[in-house]
Amino acid sequence: MDKITWEHFEAVELRVGRIVDVQEFPEASKPAYKIWADFGDDYGILKSSAQITALYDPEELIGREIIGLVNIPPRQIGPLRSEFLVTGFTNERGEVVLAMPERPVEPGARLH
């Protein structure tokens, strides 16, 4: 594994977002949701796609805090222009488990 410099790590903007809307994403090549998350005053509400349908229902995601990578270029995913990367871990069955803060924090808080 290649090591990165401290400066590279400092350039990564991993921020807490509070999910404000979730919609089905039938146009996605793999089962996914469209997600809108509030990243606070500096970033506002951003949208993305997440392949988390195996473990999460849309209604249980509203209000949940997630960790998103916000300083990446937008990426076109079918008809959706993704503005951040939803982070998570793959379990033994290949399902994505969301990365989330262990306790409540304000939207936009940066991972240190």
Image: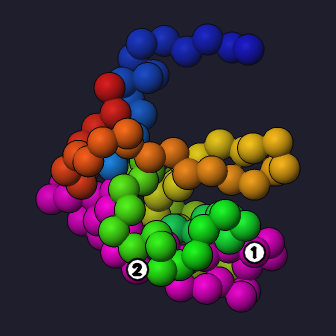
Relative to 86, residue 100 above or below: above
Locate residue 22, reporting x and y percent: 48, 79
Locate residue 92, reporting x and y percent: 82, 42
Task: Give the class, few, some or many, for how many residues have Cα within 10 Å of label 1's Cα (few <14, many ≥20).
Answer: some
Kindly identify the residue that appears in the image at 42 percent across and 34 percent down. Answer: 12
Residue 43 falls in which quadrant of the image?
Answer: bottom left
What's the residue type where badge 1 is placed? Pro
Residue bearing the label numbered 2: 21
Q: Is residue 66 visible?
A: yes
- Pick the front one: 106 or 9: 106
Locate residue 107, reporting x and y percent: 24, 54
Residue bearing the label numbered 1: 31
Please tell me whether mark 1 sits on a helix, a strand or a loop: loop
Q: Is residue 71 visible?
A: no
Quadrant location of the C terminus? top left
In the image as oriented, which residue stretches furthest toward the right? 93
Kindly identify the residue that appears in the image at 32 percent across and 62 percent down. Answer: 18
Q: Classify residue 76 as left or right of residue 103.
A: right
In the image as oriented, which residue stretches furthest toward the left? 41
In the image, is residue 54 part of the stretch drawn in magenta?
A: no
Q: Classify residue 74 as left or right of residue 45.
A: right
Residue 38 falls in which quadrant of the image?
Answer: bottom left
- Say if mark 2 contacts mark 1, CB within 8 Å: no
* Magenta stretch in the rendered image: 17-46
Relative to 108, residue 60 above or below: below
What's the residue type where badge 2 is placed? Asp
Kindly identify the residue that appears in the image at 58 percent across and 75 percent down. Answer: 57
